[in-house]
Amino acid sequence: MSIDVAIVGGGPAGLTAAADLAARGLEVVVLERESAAGGIPRHSDHLGYGIRDLRTVLTGPAYARRLVQSAIAAGAQIRTETMVTGWAGQRTLETTSPRGRERIESGAVILATGARERPRSARLIPGDRPSGVYTTGHLQNAVTLAHRTVGSRAVIVGAELVSYSAVLTLRHGGCHTVLMTTEHHRPESYTAFTTAARAGLGVKVATRTRVVRIVGSPALRAVEIENLDTGARRTVDCDTLVLTGDWVPDHELARSAGLDMDRRSLGPLVDTALRTSRPGVFAIGNLVHPVDTADAAALDGRHVAAHVLAHLDGRSRPAGGVRLLAEAPLRWVSPAILPPDDPAPPRGRLLAWTDTLVRFPTVVVRQDEVVLARRRLPWPASPGRIFRIPAAVVAAADPDGGTVTVSLS
């Protein structure tokens, strides 16, 4: 089949892009591998969704339903249980579904495949191999969608925003969180979340600790945790272990296309219009900035629509572009390419990830050993959540100059 726009991924970013483009009269098909569209919010049954994009507060499932309904009402076609298995051309996708194998040729492709948490095997946690070990996504699928029971005592690895989402899911499943562990000096999430969880749910956070052994066979009985500063170890009895955070983009389709990749974020390189290195192929959401909140990812879908239309109208993309790189303690910054005369990135923000807490950060931008900007920001740069930088700090970059670096002091 031949269509105007193919969108790979039916999460908030992909559905928002689909609604915007279909409303403009384009033939848009969303390809979603799960049995229902909506992405991570679909199985995250608590409040906190829709604030930035819909200006309201919804539960995850209600938010997912709202986005699906908006895309369908605009005229987009959503194909669930459809796996994109490869490329048969510059903008031709090969798919497999219960309907069989197909090739879908499109004028533009939007990759919105999102991100996933690293499982235990990727984190190299030694010990036994019992049941009762989950990632947040696995846990929420089991409790919210399959209505399965979990244990009664849980340990959570990580103290990010998603970690507290896991606490609420466990509570819904009748499981008490006895401990959260983090390798950092303080929890990665906002203080309000930490305080509320401690006061309302009795959740304790052990900072500067890591899980070094899993105990139990065939079912989980305990975990051994180690203090990174003293080396002291202790055993915590539990029957459920949830591994949260430590995100990696679902980038396999982007890599198989031969797109230029960011070796730090592990997602495809994009410019401020969210174009990839292949003409007519765009990348949005947590594929390029793992991992942001669902509503912020959705705004990528709204931002990319105008640039997809420009491509379909035959307008040429800007030639060249300055490379943007993060310097320690920042791990990556997105978008990573600044084309000449291009619009600002989504919401006028650069997105970055820090490996170290900087409570009172000053952003320093350099090009060819010259400081272009130095700006103090009133919010901290904290591991475990996106650090937002006003894009105006790179406005003075020379499009014909060398690499632009962004660092914190």
Image (cartoon, helix red, strand yellow):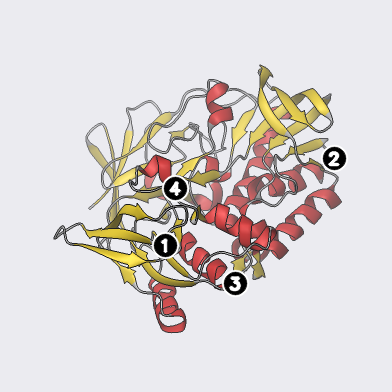
State which mark lies toward you, 4 or 3. Answer: 3
Q: Position of residue 92 (x, y in %)?
A: 71, 21
Which badge, 3 or 1, is on the more N-terminal residue?
A: 1
* Nearest to the observer: residue 123 or residue 320: 123
**The furthest residue to the left:** 230
Residue 172's disc is: 3
Q: Residue at x 49, y 68 (%)?
A: 167
Q: Position of residue 295 (x, y in %)?
A: 60, 57
* Nearest to the observer: residue 384 or residue 126: 126
**The furthest residue to the front:** 218
Q: Specify few, some or many for label 1: CA neighbours under 10 Å numbering under 14, 14-19, or 20 or more.
A: many
Question: From the viewer's perspective, is residue 318 above or below residue 408?
Answer: above
| Mark 3 element type | helix
Which badge, 1 or 2, is on the more N-terminal residue?
A: 2
| Mark 2 element type | loop
Q: Which residue is mark 2?
A: 25
373 lies left or right of 199: left
Residue 238's disc is: none
Give amino acid for label 2.
Gly
Q: Position of residue 232 (x, y in %)?
A: 17, 61
Which badge, 2 or 3, is on the more N-terminal residue?
A: 2
Give amino acid for label 4.
Leu
